[in-house]
Image: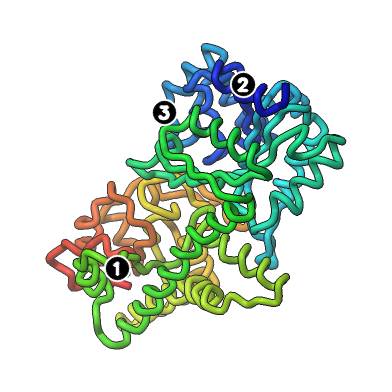
Amino acid sequence: MGIKKELIAKIQNKTLVMGVCGLGYVGLPLAVDKAKHGFKTIGFDVQREKVDMVNAGQNYIGDVVDADLAALVKTGLLRATSDFSFIKSVDFIAICVPTPLDKHQQPDISHVRNSVIAIAKNLHRGMMVVLESTTYPGTTEELVKPLLEEGSGLKCGEDFYLGFSPERVDPGNLVYKTSNTPKVVGAVGPDATEVIAMVYRAILDGEVHTVSSPAVAEMEKILENTYRNVNIGLVNELAMLCHRMGINIWEVIDAAKTKPYGFQAFYPGPGLGGHCIPLDPYYLSWKAREYGFHTSMIESSMMINDRMPEYTVERAGRILNRLKKSLNGARVLLLGVAYKQDIADYRESPALRVMEEFQRGGAKTEYYDPFVPRCRYQGQWYSSLSELTPKVIGGFDIVVVTTAHTGVDYAMVSEAGVPVFDCKNVMKDLVNRSNIEVL
């Protein structure tokens, strides 16, 4: 019996043992969904703290239900380990590790490489390996496949299946979670595509769409986030122009989105944050240079978005100047350091870049974020103010809204007698706007 029939049988009778490499924002929800659908699942992570928390049934990811994790661990359907030799026990493993940029803004795929090497040492016949980490087109076949074959002595397509299925995690999304978000699968060969897609259909509620190759799936993921990057770059540039023209960009967007077709609303802000949108265009532009191609439109939007933290501080400085105050020595309060509203994730948050730019100009900065009590940036730890009151706010020279958290009393903030630079338009419904300026 070939591996295809063996694997299909294991999927159907739920004897397939699942694995997830990397138990972060992508990996842990995926591991939980696998276990919830009756598949024994092992999570692998090099961080012992995460492994211990999972095995204790303690959740640390917002998109995972605490009770689900605890119940799955208690029943033995889910466990975690830092011992990668247990990969020998799994039939399917998804690689969900970080793919950041290095200091030169080039792809850092060291986590992927290290994970693949560990998997290769324990790869066995009849196993499926799927990369979910966002990366440049070609990674699965040009990097992962050779490492697996050389490290195991097995042949892709005959002894094991390999594919790419991009993660689509949107932290804080109240509608779409890992389980109900449509999935894209591209694998090496039609048999691998069919069986890997079958695995995802068995553990997810959303539609599974197959494509002809891993490279198509890799490029699809890059397109998703580059599309957003380019459009956000467009509205950020228009925001700067509208400010010079004395036009409210937020009102312009609200008017434009009344059109029922041909327009999707994107909004300006102090920069881009998160684990994908600020990074993915760099992956594509880096790979494009291998083909002698320059992604001019994409690179232009990246330049605009990268400049927004600096522009934010320039605008705040002008507000202070009008009040005969200097940026140098000013006390600045940032409202929010998470990269988006109502979550605790501050990866690549533009608020941290804004804080850095203020400090570079000589300002003294503090922040308030009910979701992020502490954060680490460039090797230094920062702590949120414990409370937000008129008295606390009154001790600052300016307040800058950098994250649109919904639980903040913005009316109280605006009435504290301190100028406010609202970069997220969260105060749009307030009547008294004499001390509020929007991006």
On the picture, is 12 further left or further right than 171?
A: right
Q: Which residue is found at the position 29% from the left and 68% from the top?
A: 262
Q: Earlier in the sequence, mark 3 or mark 2?
A: 2
Q: Is residue 250 left or right of residue 84?
A: left
Q: Quadrant of residue 403?
A: bottom left
Q: Nearer the viewer, mark 3 or mark 2?
A: 2
Distance from label 3 to label 2 (Cα)?
Answer: 24 Å
Mark earlier in primary sequence (2, 1): 2
Question: What residue is shown with label 3?
Answer: 65
Residue 134, given in percent of the width and then of the height, sits at 59, 52
For mark 2, what is the residue? 16
Q: Callout 1: 10 Å neighbours few (<14), some, many (20+)?
A: few
Q: Secondary structure at mark 3?
A: loop
**Which secondary structure lies at badge 2?**
loop
The amino acid type found where label 1 is placed reads Phe
Q: CA distance from mark 2 to mark 1?
A: 45 Å
Q: Position of residue 91 (x, y in %)?
A: 67, 26
Residue found 29% across the figure and 61% down from its top: 394
Mark count: 3
Residue 364 in view: no
Q: Residues within 10 Å of mark 3 (few under 14, many from 20)?
A: few
Circle 1 sits on which residue? 263
- The answer, for residue 366, to whether it is visible in the render is yes
Q: Look at 24% across and 51% down and name the residue there.
A: 409
**Circle nearer the viewer, 3 or 1:** 1
Closer to us: 8 or 205? 8
